[in-house]
Image (spheres, grey):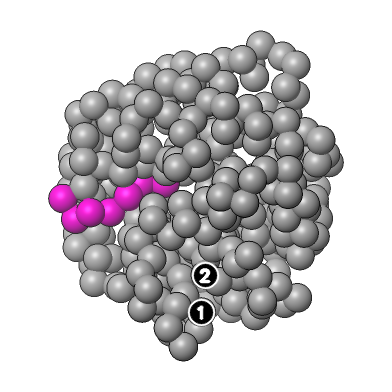
Amino acid sequence: MKWIDPHIHLFALAHGHYAWLKPENPPFWSDKAVINQTTLEPELYEGNRNLIAGFVHIEAGFDNHHPWREVQFLEQHCKGPFRSVANIHLTANSAQADINRLVRFHSVVGLRHILDDGAQTILRSPKALHTFKYMAQHQLSFDAQLDLTDTASVSALVKVLEQVPHLTVVVNHVGIAPSSRANLAYKHWQHHLRELGQHNKLAFKFSGMEMQERQWSWQYAHGVLCDVIESVPLSKLMLASNFPLCNLRMPYSALLRGYDRLLKRFDRQTAEQLRYSNAYRWYKFTPQDFEE
């Protein structure tokens, strides 16, 4: 069964900035060298060409001041079907002008501002609200990266959904699931999953477990996936890789094989939704994308 991987990054180190990948800049990971290398579309397909039907490229810090440069590079160099989620600074004075420029690119369907610890402050900003409304007018989705164990951040996101009801939001890395399923933080996380899952225009991507725990286990992954499926409608969930950051735990090909084994525990329709049709719909692929 084919995959559309809805969360990958490509690094063109000779062309972009990628300040966050440089060893002198945060995050100060001891294993950052594993990913601090040029990684382009051929590396994504290596050993996986018959599996990957398409992908969604999530901004990777190519040039945060001129986000269209990353998209321009991708559209010039990528051969397979793909969509782009470009960088946006939600509170910048240039946000509207940046959106006007980004919508000219055929691959751009969404935007991302990494919220993380600043989620509550950013999401409650009047400037951010204005940007969200402008995004919705242009039918662009927003990839939200934030910690769903934080009640204040979740409340701020819910407020945005209420104030901009036509905005589509996709929560990255399933809201940064805690590395242990046996603590209070995990219960808060699951409660907020259920709360957000009630919103029609919001979806989740299951990925990025290495961001919390480098040595996560498949038993843990299966438990979290089952908890997510119990908490949100299946139509709102996509299985993703976070390539090449997944290499901090295991090679991309190994991750895909592991996902394949994991999905054999579910019925075929569930598996097809998780690895293809949901990503196809949420990220606006078309039949023409897959014509030879």
Characterize the local packing of mark 1: few (<14), some (14-19) or many (20 or more) Cα atoms within 10 angstroms: some
Q: Does label 1 or label 2 sit earlier along the sequence?
A: 2
Residue type at mark 1 is Gly
Q: Is residue 9 visible?
A: no
At x 55%, y 37%, the residue is 174
- Does 80 appear in magenta? no
Residue at the disc numbered 2: 54
SS under mark 2: strand
Q: Position of residue 97 (x, y in %)?
A: 19, 59
Note whether 55 is above or below 40 in the view shown: above
Q: Residue at x 56, y 55 (%)?
A: 272
Specify the label residue 80 is tagged with: 1
Q: Is residue 134 visible?
A: yes
For the point 51% across and 79% down, which residue is it? Answer: 80
Query: Do the numbered discs 1 and 2 sit on residues whose CB atoms are within 8 Å?
Result: yes
Q: Is residue 165 above or below residue 206?
A: above
Residue at mark 1 to residue at mark 2: CA–CA distance:
6 Å
